[in-house]
Amino acid sequence: MFAGLFHVDRKRRASGYIILGLFLLALGFLVRARPGWTLRAKALSQSNAEAPKQRIEGEVIVLNWTGFEPREISRSAGPFLLLISNYSHLPVATLVLEREGKAIRSILLAENKRHWSDTVDLPSGTYILREATHSNWYCKINLK
């Protein structure tokens, strides 16, 4: 009669140990990764301290299973942060930035790399960001 009661208690205790183990494992990964974070933060703060403070705008473009969102961006020319998030579920997304039919830049997003960002400084004009294997997936970028 009491044997079943102790058996349930063992299951709960075992699941508690599993949860505790996973928590400690995650904590270990965070502690191990933290020195890299602090070094990077120090490097960024040093580089920011030397450079004059300049505010930079950004544009976010999402590639999903139906194409790019938004389909068109209009903004003033000059440097801006371009962030592209890949939610298309393609094994590899090859993005091409074109001006007047000529490729300016190519970006390769593997399945395990969902985000890409860089500061771009393009002259005025009309640009097309497209996915190489899907001709109807594009985003038009107008810089004035």
Image: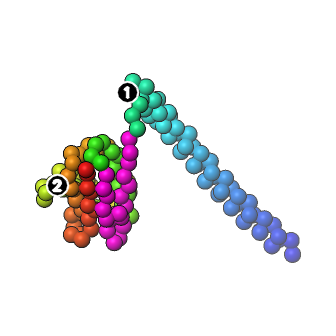
Q: Residue furthest front?
A: 144
Please name the residue that numbered disc 1 is placed on: 51
Name the residue located 27 percent from the left edge and 57 percent from the top edge.
141
The residue lying at 40 percent from left, 38 percent from top is 55
Could you tell me which secondary element the residue under label 1 belongs to? loop
Above-or-below relation of 2 to 41:
below
Residue 14 in sight here: yes
Helix, strand or loop status at disc 2:
strand
- Give the residue displayed 68% in from the left and 61% down from the top: 15
Q: Amino acid at mark 1?
A: Ala
Answer whether labels 1 and 2 touch (C-beta < 8 Å). Answer: no
Region rendered in magenta: 56-75
* 141 lies left or right of 14: left
Label drawn at residue 99: 2
Give the x, y percent position of residue 22: 61, 53
Tell me where residue 90 sits by quadrant: bottom left
Q: Quadrant of the N terminus?
A: bottom right
**Of residues 6 and 67, which is closer to you in this image?**
67
Label located before the other in sequence (1 or 2): 1
Please name the colour scheme applied to the rendered image: rainbow
Provide residue 106's location: percent of width, then percent of height: 21, 53
Mark 2 residue crowding within 10 angstroms, few (<14) / some (14–19) / many (20+): some
Q: Please, what is the three-letter code of the amino acid marked with disc 2?
A: Arg
Residue 66 shown in magenta: yes
